[in-house]
Image: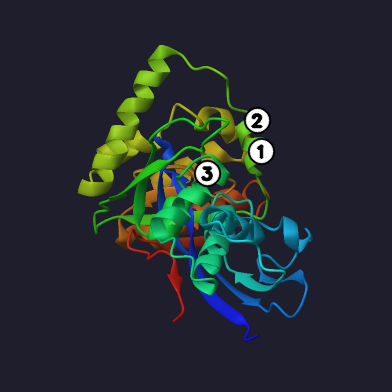
Amino acid sequence: MTAMRATVHVPGSTSNLGGGFDCVGMAVNRWLTATVVIDESRMGVTMSRAGSLASLTCDAADDLLHTGFHAACARAGRALPVHMAFDVTSTIPVARGLGSSAAALVAGAALADAALSLGLGTHVIATLASQIEGHPDNASPAAFGGAMLGVARDDATAFAPCTYTFSPLTVHATLAFIFAVPPMEVTTAAARAVLPAHVSFGDAVSAVQRSAALVHGLATGDADLLARALDDVLHVPYRRQLVPGYDAIVQAACAAGAFGGTLSGSGSAMLAIGRPEQAKEIADAMQVAFADVGLTAETLVTDGAVGGLWTEP
């Protein structure tokens, strides 16, 4: 039997962007590339990892790439192949708030779709990854690219998972997104654990205002709206403690010309938004602020036009 093969490329992503908690995300110019070879004359699952994934030690069957592949097969009513050889490399830092988990899930589902000709398409792939993660803010930009809004259409039940509406968001050409990425990890579980079970009515109202400011500020490039949007009240006040020097890093970014700063996802990476002509100065300032607390951070500057998932022909 002829072996089946597919290769996909998936971007990293930043999520929340302050006021867009669990619903707004944007593709980032870091990439995961994965290949699968399926040979029905053999047995077993293998996983070769490189780049930022080289130090992962989980079994192949427990890898999120395999999880996404499995989910796609289940959605299409297709049995898992008896043999799969995965080869994956990534420049997306792991557990830093840049969407490494969502990228792996999207890549796995896309590999199954391409290699097995499942006919699922990007919307279903984004939905599957969002269902596994429990929120769409990283999975949707990983699949579609650019900035995305993902909204739950219903609640998950014991009989059916949640479904989503995905919509692209306009990002003004005068905006630059500056990241400082320290070596420390913040797991999603740790970041979720510090969130309160309830928030006040006043905080809920403030969160709605900031969410609206974020969407309109991204579209118009309005510095004042984005400054308000980045000053989140819903999750950042509880998660900032997980990143040493959080306040000093935000202050340094603003002093260098940023409109504001916040966590990328749940951290540990930090995000600032400013103008392209000041991006390097902002990045350098954030890097120095991290160094002041003993952490060597790498920096990344991107815009809102990074593409999404693509499959090699």
User: Which amino acid type is marked by label 3?
Assistant: Gln
Quote the CA–CA distance across marks 2 and 1: 6 Å
Residue 80 visible to an observer of this rendering? yes
Q: How crowded is mark 3: few (under 14 residues within 10 Å), some or many (20 or more)?
A: some
Residue at the image position 50 percent from the left and 46 percent from the top: 130
In the rendered image, residue 184, in percent from the top left (x then y), is placed at: 68, 50
Is residue 30 placed above or below 26 in the rendered structure? below
In the figure, is residue 184 to the left or right of 300? right
Residue at label 3?
131
Q: Do the residues labelled 2 and 1 touch (CB within 8 Å)?
A: yes
Residue 244 visible to an observer of this rendering? no
Residue 29 badge? none
Place residue 298 in its image quadrant: bottom right
User: Which amino acid type is marked by label 1?
Assistant: Ala
Q: Residues within 10 Å of mark 1 (few under 14, many from 20)?
A: few
Residue at label 2?
193
In the rendered image, residue 214, in percent from the top left (x then y), is placed at: 31, 39
Q: Is mark 2 on a helix, strand or loop?
A: helix
In the rendered image, residue 229, in percent from the top left (x then y), is placed at: 35, 36
Q: Which quadrant: the N terminus? A: bottom right
Q: Which quadrant: the C terminus? A: bottom left
Lower sequence index among marks 3 and 1: 3
In the rendered image, residue 134, in percent from the top left (x then y), is placed at: 54, 39
Quote the CA–CA distance across marks 3 and 1: 16 Å
Residue at the image position 73 percent from the left and 80 percent from the top: 41
Q: Are marks 2 and 3 in contact (CB under 8 Å)?
A: no
Lower sequence index among marks 2 and 3: 3
Quote the CA–CA distance across marks 2 and 3: 20 Å
Q: Is mark 1 on a helix, strand or loop?
A: helix
In front: mark 2 or mark 3? 3
